[in-house]
Amino acid sequence: MWAAIVLVVLACGYLYTNRHLPSKFKQQKAVGWNAYFDVAVQGGLFLGSGLFLTIALWLTAWVIMCLFNIPWLFDWTSHKFTFAYDILKIRIFGLSFFSAATLGFTILISIGAAKNAEKKFRDPSQRNAILREIASNSATESVIFEAIESGLLLLITLKSRKVYVGMVDEARFHHLDTDTIVIIPLMSGYRHKDTLTFVMENNYAQHYEEEGITLTSQPLSVYQFRHVLPFDQIESLSLFNVNTFEKFKSRSNDMDNDTDTN
């Protein structure tokens, strides 16, 4: 019986942490048994809430029973109600009514909390607060959130030294996808094998402009050029400013020219 109770508590904790985005990110960052403890703690909170509701329900039944028994106090021939005590003798699937009610409330509370967490994230007015909560606990997500909130570009270097510069697509957040990052590329290239500087190969922004491709164009829009990059393949990421990149590139070329001249 205890094994079944522990299983239900863990399942309820997992249901919520898998729907609550900050908890899901925290789980992915957890090491070893920490992820299981997080699930167990959350499930324990739901179990405590279920226990509280069960006690409240029984106390309500007991108070009603006492009110019904007031006539019995003055007339011993009156019927004495005992339903508040009788329900404690009921057994459901081998569990006492008290245990079954506690688990039932635990499951209902966890389902409600999970749905509420998803509903909050779908609400644009509350989404930024959730993303800020995630960003406060992760340097990586902080950079991604800043790129989304401020409309800046993101420069992503893969372990293969392939480089992408683009706008972050919020689709990964809409689908609670914490394993990938989706970008709309504006440039791509690679890291120079010696200097590790960014060498641009493809200018998507120029292609979009030449072909009249926009966010809403048909049959092709910029969304058809989305790239899904797995997090485990990312070496580094940072905010990117085109003007700064061009200035650094110009200075680097001037320095190379001076070196060649000398």
Image (cartoon, grey):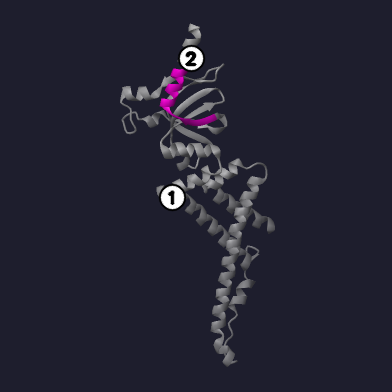
Identify whether 46 is placed above or below 89. Answer: above
Could you tell me which residue is drawn at 67 percent across and 42 percent down?
32
Estimate the x, y position of residue 144 in percent, counting from the top left: 48, 37
The residue most toward the top is 261
Q: How many residues crowd mark 2 within 10 Å: few (<14), some (14–19), many (20+)?
A: few
Secondary structure, mark 2, is helix
Residue 67 shown left or right of residue 224 in the figure: right
Identify whether 69 is placed above or below 240. Answer: below
Q: How many numbered tags mark residues here? A: 2
In contact (CB < 8 Å): disc 1 and disc 2: no
The residue most toward the front is 262
Estimate the x, y position of residue 159 in percent, counting from the top left: 57, 25
- Asked if the stretch drawn in magenta spans residue 18, the answer is no
Q: How many residues crowd mark 1 within 10 Å: few (<14), some (14–19), many (20+)?
A: few
Residue 220 shown left or right of residue 161 in the figure: left
Secondary structure, mark 1, is helix
Kindly identify which residue carries mark 1. 126
Q: Which residues are magenta?
A: 236-252
